[in-house]
Image (cartoon, coloured by chain):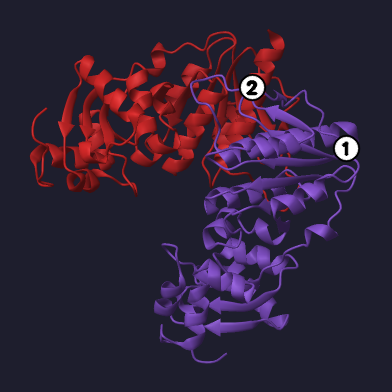
Chain colours: A red, B purple
Amino acid sequence: MATPITSTANERVKQIRALRLRKERERSGLCYVEGIRAVGEAVQTSAEVETLVVAPALLTSDFARALVERAAAEGVAALEVTPAVFASLSEREGPQGLAAVVRQRWARLEDVRVAPGECWLALDAIADPGNLGTIVRTCDAAGAAGLVLLGGSTDPYDPAAVRASMGAVFGLRLARASWDAFVAWAQEDGVRLVGTSARDGEHYREADFGERTVLLLGSEREGLSAEQRAACDVLVSIPMRGRASSLNLAVAAGVLLYEALERRERRT
Amino acid sequence: MATPITSTANERVKQIRALRLRKERERSGLCYVEGIRAVGEAVQTSAEVETLVVAPALLTSDFARALVERAAAEGVAALEVTPAVFASLSEREGPQGLAAVVRQRWARLEDVRVAPGECWLALDAIADPGNLGTIVRTCDAAGAAGLVLLGGSTDPYDPAAVRASMGAVFGLRLARASWDAFVAWAQEDGVRLVGTSARDGEHYREADFGERTVLLLGSEREGLSAEQRAACDVLVSIPMRGRASSLNLAVAAGVLLYEALERRERRT
């Protein structure tokens, strides 16, 4: 390969660094992925890896070296940089010497059909990227079919979200939509829109999730609005047995996604 | 009240700032709590609030003012400070002008009995304070009786943990123990130690949790060691249907704590 880039002011390096900003991610349709595990997910799934960023002097893991070789064999461009340049791109302590620029992938909601036996998760106005990444990871683990982001939700391609997802963001179907477009989509015959309510929903273990399920969770602070609740086919509540009035959003999503999985596996 | 303290180098202010450090929290047995909600939990539960830290110029919420009055009526000392001094204590952006120094409370594990119908959670070597705080919040919500911290676990009285717990740390019974002391405790007749395993445990919905349950989860990275697994009465697994090999620890704890709650409520 070529001589490693030594300047943090190199144009290509500056372009990549700009991917920290959501505006630049939206403009380019790209994202920046750090860490061997998440880069590994990107390379091993069908994600479109545009460039691998490699600091050879930092790359000590055999798994990481094999990833670099595999990507090279597949024709992925590699940008070699010095440890100092790598650190200037990195938001992590102890950078592992491997990162990637990956093309974002979004499904068009109007092209998505909720198939029988599928569960989708929809989130409105989620604010915290780490929470969102944890939820993406949980969607993957609980076999959810995909995730729809509504309203002013944070970006699943934010570096903190990608990291918290452990790279699962590259394997999950993602869509985003306005509330109106989402409601029109979820009103399709046979799709059951299951909303959450802090107190006055049916017990989540007893409510009917239907055979084609869309779970809808509100924001960390506000939950669902009255209009959103009214659009749901059923509202469910998770019991609160202590002083707390709510769960962390990722924990609530996990409890409901695993209930939905249990329903599907019990049925088959 | 007295004139607000204007110097960030004031001795009392320096003592309080030192509570950011675990060493100082351990030495003093105190912790520092920020935010109206968490301070509210401390005041409204039986936590021993040593000092309220108030920046009157920042205090805009009626709820916060009522908390200050209630604490004053109960004889809690108040330290008035300027916004600049408050900001020097605060790890949050947008400080709300109310914080507290609260005495930590730890149960001695040897004094704890797991009563029939109770579920305790034990965590080994949990590293992330935010994750720990989220788990404390979930314990409260799911009606767990308490939390035992093993090995080199992070501190539930770390400001980030207190914040993520939404103050639930002041209502939950907490204990800490060495692994050996914990095993001796959990071997009491009738207590069922339910460990977690990534792949080869019983399905968590099918395994026997017993009538007196102690759930044991390992660290974020390592899970349980072979020795720890061998000490358990049963190992359970949460299904992993995607590419991910594990869940976020707080999500896994949530799924299991709500399963344990369901068992208890189904029985009664």
Q: Chain of mark 2?
A: A
Horizontal side, residue B68 vs residue A148: left or right: right
Q: Is residue A105 above or below residue B40?
A: above
Front one among B111 and A127: B111
Residue at left offset 71%, top offset 68%: B47
Q: Which residue is mark 1?
A: B211
| Farthest bottom residue in view | B2
Q: Are marks 2 and 1 in contact (CB under 8 Å)?
A: no
Up/down of B260 relative to B15, above or below:
above
- Callout 2: SS: helix
Q: The C terminus of chain B lies in which quarter of the figure?
A: top right
**Does residue A225 appear in the picture of this structure?**
no
Q: Which residue is mark 2?
A: A260
Disc 1 element: loop
Q: CA distance from mark 2 to mark 1?
A: 26 Å
The amino acid type, in three-letter code, at marker 1 is Glu
Query: Residue under mark 1: which chain is it in?
Result: B
Q: Which mark is residue A82?
A: none
Where residue B222 sits in the image (x, y, percent)? 55, 38
User: Closest to the observer: B206 or B62?
Assistant: B206
- Residue B168 appears in the picture as rendered: yes
Q: Where residue B263 sits in the image (x, y, percent)?
A: 82, 32
- Left or right? Give the position of A127 relative to A229: left
Given this view, does label 2 or label 1 mark the residue nearer the observer? 1
Q: Position of residue B256 (x, y in %)?
A: 70, 35
Amino acid type at image mark 2:
Ala
Residue B105, image x, y percentages = 71, 66
